[in-house]
Image (tube, helix red, strand yellow):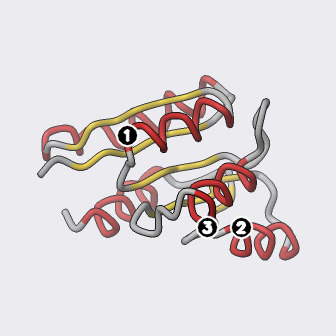
Amino acid sequence: MSKTILIADDELHIRALLEQTLEDLEDEGVELLTVANGQEAIDTIQAETPDLVFLDVMMPKMDGYQVCHEAKRTLGLSETFIVLLTAKGQEADQQKGYEAGADLYMTKPFDPDVILTKAEEILGL
């Protein structure tokens, strides 16, 4: 069964870096999806039910906390693993992320090797 990763970030260079970091997983049958704002993220999560989401917090239309809360609490997608990947590294921000339903909170700038290893771990590859 194929796996799906959604990358949701409003910054094109971050989306590109994450795509480049994770592209080797496509050889393992993983599909990569990208969106540029929170509304597109929740629409894609609802339509595609990705296995893993790398979600920025500060995005237009809907922030990452709202997307996470909507996916986990409203849509009940407990099987979708959500990583909040953000520049907001304060403890209060992390707590807000976990309260919204995030499974993991990581800060930018990130190490691409850590992102790839986490994705492989989460997807069981």
Secondary structure of the residue carrying tag 3 is loop
Query: In the image, is residue 31 above or below residue 119?
Result: above
Secondary structure of the residue carrying tag 2 is helix
Q: Which residue is mark 2?
A: 100
Q: CA distance from mark 1 to mark 2?
A: 20 Å
Q: Which residue is mark 1?
A: 48
Q: Position of residue 120 (x, y in %)?
A: 29, 61
Q: CA distance from mark 1 to mark 3?
A: 18 Å
Q: Position of residue 12 (x, y in %)?
A: 61, 23
Q: Which residue is mark 3?
A: 102
Amino acid tagged 2: Ala
The crowd level at tag 2 (other Cα within 10 Å; few <14, some 14-19, many 20+) is some
The earlier-in-sequence mark between 1 and 2 is 1
What is the residue that sits farthest to the top in this orientation?
Answer: 12
Between 48 and 81, the one nearer to me in the picture: 48
- Give the position of the C terminus as an image quadrant: bottom left
Give me the residue at 39% from left, 41% from top: 21
Q: Which label number is shown at residue 12?
A: none
Q: Nearer the viewer, mark 1 or mark 3?
A: 1
Amino acid tagged 3: Ala
The crowd level at tag 1 (other Cα within 10 Å; few <14, some 14-19, many 20+) is few
Secondary structure of the residue carrying tag 1 is helix
Give me the residue at 67% from left, 49% from top: 67
Discs 3, 2 touching: Cβ within 8 Å: yes
The crowd level at tag 3 (other Cα within 10 Å; few <14, some 14-19, many 20+) is many
Give me the residue at 66% from left, 33% from top: 39
Amino acid tagged 1: Glu
* Quadrant of residue 15 within the rendered picture: top right
Q: Is residue 36 left or right of residue 88?
A: left
* Quadrant of residue 92 within the rendered picture: bottom right
